């Protein structure tokens, strides 16, 4: 058995392990910094992250099995068939044919993906939970113990491979479209059109993806993983009462000109930021001034966008700069330090602009530009605050990717694309319908490894 194949499997497992533990460890940083949590509890949580990633039904094992299915297993099968044929004194001509070798590789990949699919969907912990009841006593039987809990059985759900399926789908589409573009792009007569397409396809993919993600964060947070919701909330630093008001306006519980129970949501925000409480009441003020969205810091939407850029930049810098410095520890020098600062600053500018454009997009639609393009009879303030202003911010923020290096735009775009697709499909489903998802998983997992003839 060739050592290079074993190295590939170990590398695949290691990459899968880092991809699973890395984000979870980053999410624990806020817990580690807290002084009211004991060292034992912090250590227990960290060790739990490292330990659970090694379970056989987790993503690292899946990576190793899939790579083994396309490297070692076909080699073992071919050697076994060659030994069997030699023992029977049969020729091996058919074993050397390309069609035979392709069939062996396909079946090996198919079976390894089948095994990984079954392992990833074999988690039996989620289908059950315990719920509490008030103590129940039996007067006729005083020796009977009170019943305080009962086991409730949930449906046996599948869908743990969905994220990987969507990731592989995006990569397969990228490989297919990239191959077709390479072969057909020379037929495009217009060089500016070709240059424009090459330059803006990645920003377009990213912008479309984050539009879905941010829209889900505003109005459908259950469609996103909890870690995503937490991270976006921290980066946006949005007053939760503003978020609740936008959701209430979307659902029709927060209406202009009509007193409703939800009409007072923003009044505490106004009083806490030295603004009249009436400014936050839609029954008394139409429309709500942007100063309320700015939390009283300024009445200028442009200045507020700059403030949000600064805040987002510093938030990202605390994350990106240590990472950039860590990556250059092996070759520490003044030049590498400068490169770390420049790289972290560029990525932080991207994230700061992302946050600023979300806020400015909202203001641009609801007060700065929207009412000047459309009259109140055509698009009412309720329509702007009921979703259109948020849509404007979601559409605008993605173009901040243009501040990133061109080489990184594709990486970032195809990182968020699977997450965006996950917001429009169910994340868990009954195991009775898991076969169609397995077929998609199998076909798509093979697609990036099959050369396009």
Image (cartoon, grey):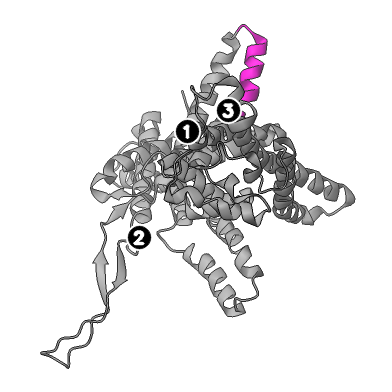
Q: Earlier in the sequence, mark 3 or mark 1?
A: 1
Q: What x and y, as percent, mark residue 433? A: 25, 44
Q: Within 10 Å of the Cα at label 1, are there few (<14), some (14-19), or many (20+) other Cα atoms? A: many
Q: What x and y, as percent, mark residue 297? A: 72, 47
Q: Earlier in the sequence, mark 2 or mark 3?
A: 2
Q: Quadrant of residue 358?
A: top right
Distance, label 3 to label 1, CA atoms, is 18 Å
Distance, label 2 to label 3, CA atoms, is 37 Å
> Is residue 192 shown left or right of residue 212?
right
- The nearer-to-camera label among 2 and 3 is 3
Give the vertical position of 71 relative to 94 (above or below): below
Q: Residue 100 magenta-drawn? A: no
- Say which element carries label 2: loop
> Is residue 114 shown left or right of residue 380?
left
- What number is the disc on residue 123? 2
Q: Within 10 Å of the Cα at label 3, are there few (<14), some (14-19), or many (20+) other Cα atoms? A: some
- The nearer-to-camera label among 3 and 1 is 3
């Amino acid at each position: 058995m060739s050592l290079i194949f074993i190295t590939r499997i170990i590398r695949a497992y290691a990459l899968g392990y880092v991809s699973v533990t890395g984000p979870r460890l980053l999410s624990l940083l806020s817990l580690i910094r807290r002084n009211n949590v004991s060292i034992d509890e912090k250590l227990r949580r960290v060790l739990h992250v490292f330990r659970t990633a090694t379970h056989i039904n987790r993503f690292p094992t899946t990576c190793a099995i899939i790579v083994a299915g396309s490297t070692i297993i076909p080699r073992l099968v071919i050697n076994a068939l060659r030994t069997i044929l030699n023992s029977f004194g049969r020729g091996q001509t058919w074993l050397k044919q390309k069609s035979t070798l392709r069939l062996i590789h396909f079946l090996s990949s198919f079976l390894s993906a089948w095994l990984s699919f079954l392992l990833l969907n074999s988690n039996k912990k989620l289908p059950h939970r315990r719920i509490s009841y008030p103590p129940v006593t039996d007067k006729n039987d005083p020796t009977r113990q009170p019943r305080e809990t009962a086991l409730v059985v949930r449906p046996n759900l599948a869908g743990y491979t969905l994220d990987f399926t969507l990731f592989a789908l995006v990569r397969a589409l990228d490989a297919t479209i990239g191959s077709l573009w390479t072969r057909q792009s020379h037929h495009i007569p217009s060089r500016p059109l070709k240059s424009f397409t090459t330059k803006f396809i990645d920003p377009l993919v990213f912008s479309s993806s984050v539009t879905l993600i941010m829209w889900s964060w505003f109005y459908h947070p259950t469609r996103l993983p909890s870690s995503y919701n937490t991270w976006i909330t921290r980066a946006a630093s949005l007053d939760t009462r503003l978020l609740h008001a936008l959701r209430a306006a979307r659902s029709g519980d927060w209406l202009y000109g009509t007193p409703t129970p939800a009409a007072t949501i923003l009044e505490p925000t106004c009083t806490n930021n030295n603004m009249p409480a009436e400014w936050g009441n839609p029954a008394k003020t139409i429309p709500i001034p942007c100063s309320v969205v700015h939390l009283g810091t300024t009445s200028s939407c442009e200045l507020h966008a700059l403030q949000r850029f600064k805040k987002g930049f510093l938030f990202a810098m605390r994350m990106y700069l240590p990472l950039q410095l860590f990556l250059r520890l092996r070759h520490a020098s003044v030049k590498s330090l400068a490169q770390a600062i420049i790289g972290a600053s560029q990525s932080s500018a991207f994230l700061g602009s992302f946050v600023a454009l979300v806020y400015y997009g909202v203001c641009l639609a609801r007060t700065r530009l929207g009412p000047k393009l459309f009259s109140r009879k055509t698009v009412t303030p309720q329509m702007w605050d009921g979703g259109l202003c948020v849509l404007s911010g979601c559409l605008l923020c993605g173009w901040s990717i243009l501040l990133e290096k061109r080489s990184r735009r594709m990486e970032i775009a195809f990182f968020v694309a699977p997450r965006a697709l996950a917001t429009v499909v169910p994340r868990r489903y009954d195991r009775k319908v898991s076969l169609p998802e397995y077929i998609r998983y199998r076909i798509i997992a093979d697609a990036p490894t099959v050369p396009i003839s």
